[in-house]
Amino acid sequence: MHSSSDSLQDNVPSLIDATLDDLQRGLSQKHFTSVQLVQAYKARIAEVNSIFKAEKGARSMLHGLPFLLKDNIATLNRIEATSGSTVLLGTRPSVEAGVVKRLREAGAVILSTANLSEFAGFRHTNASTGWTSGSSTGSATSVGLGLTLAGLGTETVSSIVSPAEKSCVVGFKPTHGTLPTYGIIPVSHRQDMVGTIGRTVKDVAQILGVLVESSRYREKPDYAASCDGTDLVGVRIGVVLHPGKKIDPAKLDSFHEALALLKGAGAVIIDGLQLAGVQEYEALSQRMKDIVLETDFKASMDAYLLSLAKTPRRILTLQALVRAITNDPSEDIPARNVDVMQRALGTSTDAPDYTLMLQNEEYYSSSGGFEGTMDRHDCGVLIAPAGSLTLQTFASIGGNPVITVPMGIYPDGTKVEYNETRGGLVLVAPGIRFSLFLYGRKHRDPRLLRVAHAFEQLSAARKRARPYKLPESDLKDFIPETKTQRLKRGML
């Protein structure tokens, strides 16, 4: 004869095979309770965790840590990459982005995607007042508010470093080609780059070290090792200015303080440098400045859309994409236009102006740009007191690494300035943060990180700049107190 406990256990399914119906039936018939079920699952998790840790250990320093992805970085799970557009909902890539693959291998937790200016700013000319100086806005804002440890963004021109400045965090675009860009909804196959946004220079350096494929190097760079101390003895740093660009007095004062800190750390400062090609570039018509990226956008987007494994609306070309956006009421036509995309549709890789501008860019990426300036003045790093679209364009064309580090805050009494071309967005006002912009030689990212880390440690500007409003939930709220802790607080 079987005991009642034996017969009761006969009605309990094994968790390896249990279905929803099995568990619902067991609960309703009181064969077990919800508490017992949760205890059993937690015990199984603990067993697996102990086995995994004993045999494998943590996969990397990113194991178990949360990340947000910019919404143009594709995954193969339920997280869709739409580049901020409703018309790409339901699409599925044929491959997962290379950086996502590396995050998974490292054991990182992908929380979700972060919003961006639609198609990385390559849709319309009348963006809303939500514009925050570049398209990796959601990634930067999320890090700034402590919604994630770090975020991955993409940059064609300024799209990582400028939003990071607005959110008072560190934005790092490494040398072009350091990280894979396949699986990214593109702007330009030649200039797009994946980068990291984090709380500190060391954070972004450590993350890059995990994401970089070792097989690409004979000796993989140790990015994190650059973030050790503040000694800059003998490091030559050039100050590059954008001719004619007005710098706010408060920002200029903070920049002079930054120079003093760098000098105090032993750096040699070479003042008053300019990129040789800047004046020639700025004399070009806007059409010539835009033609390469707009031509690239058409070719790159056509290739990406054609590669999709699933596209419910049969959007296989840029032309089909424009048509879908125009016909979708949720895309807010005509309040937000598709002028940039329309211009891209009219481009051709055979156009003489496109060929001419590619030739010009060879100069801007070499002797006329950052590399040439650093060669002529024997500098390893160039710094600037403010973000300049022209300087950012040259860094993008040249593939140079760029990093922004919080530098200061506009003080009380600062006159408010508005961006009239972006719906009246406030640009300058008391409490708004700004950053130091640092540029490095291609494939010399560790040197750039060394200078950025030293400045960050010496200035501690980020700690002085706190968001005016923050979420109240914090990690301690989710960690139950022990009996001893409750006794200490007089609760028992």
Image (cartoon, rainbow, N blue to C red):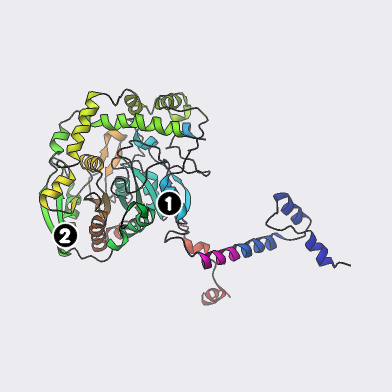
Q: Which residue lies furthest to the right in this view?
A: 1
Q: How crowded is mark 1: few (under 14 residues within 10 Å), some or many (20 or more)?
A: some
Residue drawn 33% across the image and 40% down it: 192
Q: In this view, does 25 lie to the left or right of 448?
A: right
Mark 2 lies on residue: 235
- The three-letter code of the residue at mark 2 reads Val
Q: In which quarter of the image is the N terminus?
A: bottom right
Residue 51 included in the magenta stretch of the image? yes
Residue drawn 15% across the image and 38% down it: 278
Q: Is residue 212 at least partly visible in the picture?
A: no
Residue drawn 35% across the image and 51% down it: 197
- The three-letter code of the residue at mark 1 reads Arg
Residue 102, numbered circle: 1
Residue 175, numbered circle: none
As helix, strand or loop, the secondary structure at mark 1 comes to: helix
Residue 309, image x and y in percent?
Answer: 50, 35
**Discs 2, 1 touching: Cβ within 8 Å:** no
Placement of 273 over or under 301, stated as above or below: below
Q: Is residue 136 left or right of residue 362?
A: right
Which sits in the foreground, 393 or 491?
A: 393
- Magenta stretch, main secondary structure class: helix
Which sits in the foreground, 336 or 376?
A: 376
Residue drawn 26% across the image and 49% down it: 402
- Which mark sits nearer the N-terminus, 2 or 1? 1
Q: Which residue lies furthest to the front in this view?
A: 218
Res. 263 image quadrant? bottom left
Which sits in the foreground, 444 or 320?
A: 444
Residue 110, image x and y in percent?
Answer: 47, 51
Residue 474 included in the magenta stretch of the image? no
Q: Give the range drawn in magenta.
A: 45-55
